[in-house]
Amino acid sequence: MTTTWTESVVVTRQDPTPRIAVFELARADGAELWDYEPGAHIDVMAGADGLIRQYSLCGPAGVRKQYRLAVLNEQASRGGSRAMHALAEGDTVRISAPRNRFGLAPVRRHVLLAGGIGITPLLAMSLALDAAGGDYHLHYCARTRAEAAFATELQNNPRVSLHFDDEPAGQRLDLARDLGPPQSDTALYACGPGGFMDHVLGRAAELGWPPSALHKERFSAAAADLQDGAPASGAFTVRLASTGAEYRIGGEETILDVLLDNGVDAPYSCRQGICGECVVRVLAGEPDHRDDVLTDAERADGMFTLCSSRARSPHLEVDL
């Protein structure tokens, strides 16, 4: 489905670390931006090639004149971070309305675990909880203090703990100590690079935290967790319930790519299975889930990502 783009301008740019740039964006026409809840992200179209990438909003919710983003210049990126780091104050980019699949749960207490640039959505959560008087603790992990873009902003907050790999061992993140056993009124939120996420989520499970209490947002999808004996990339057919049209999905193709190539107006954004924009419902067939955004309950309810997931059955019918 077509994204509605809004022209915006870079109002300010700061470089708190050599690899992280923090941008304030405002609408080019001076009007207000959309309201959003903490944990939301937007699509940004930048660079001569019109690269589209997703970035979390890390400013205080309710400020509708400007959006704050922090972007890591990732050497192994697909080009989006380099396009963002080429921006200067006064340059224009196009942005989408915010979307949110990583919002705060309705619980009494929140434990926020950030790795590196994964601080961005959790920073917005901490600001909202501070404003509302919510109960939370934020653990902000980075390789060094110099690489932690928001360390100065957070270091005097008594509900924030900073953890750096190159400082004394006693201050490093220890989930047995800093998280502990599960509490029925507490939710855990994690965002960061793959190794950090695997460690946090794996250790939380070892400590007994149930999946329903764990909320996560990754930069890229985790490796597919295939069932024993399941084909890794076999071909199958997708049927659209609305038209009855059928499309053959080859072993190296995604459902989304095939649908778009055939003129189907399918929803999408990140194309990695991490944003949830392309989620549809499966009406028939057995899905092979390869996303990192849907919960077990959502999968059991028939939800399915077109951009990354596949089928274990020869045919799959989707509500599209």
Image: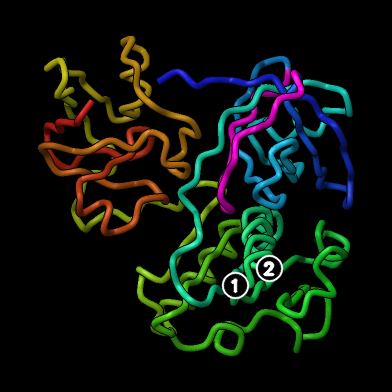
Q: Nearer the viewer, residue 271 or 10?
A: 10
Looking at the rendering, which quadrant does residue 110 occupy? bottom right
- Left or right side of 166 for 232: left
Q: Residues within 10 Å of mark 1 (few under 14, many from 20)?
A: some
Q: Which residue is drawn at the image coordinates 27% and 38% (left, top)?
A: 310
Where residue 99 appears, as percent x and y from the top left, is: 51, 40
Residue that numbered label 1 is attached to:
134
Dots 2 and 1: beta carbons under 8 Å? Answer: yes
| Residue 214 locus on image (x, y percent) | 44, 68
Please tell me whether residue 267 is drawn above or below residue 69 in the rendered image: above
Mark 2 sits on what residue?
Answer: 130
Tell me which segment is drawn in magenta.
29-47
Q: Residue at horizontal 62%, vertical 60%?
A: 125
Q: Please tell me whether mark 1 sits on a helix, a strand or a loop.
A: loop
Residue 234, x across and y down, in percent: 23, 35
Residue 236, quarter of picture = top left
Q: Please name the amino acid that badge 2 sits on.
A: Asp
Q: Amino acid at mark 1?
A: Gly
Residue depicted at 13% across the width and 37% down the height? 283
Q: Main secondary structure of the magenta part?
A: loop
Q: Position of residue 213 (x, y in %)?
A: 41, 71
Q: Which residue sits furthest top? A: 263
Which mark, by number, is residue 168? none
Verify whether residue 110 appears in magenta.
no
Whole-angstrom CA distance, mark 2 to mark 1, is 6 Å
Say left or right for 225 vs 193. left
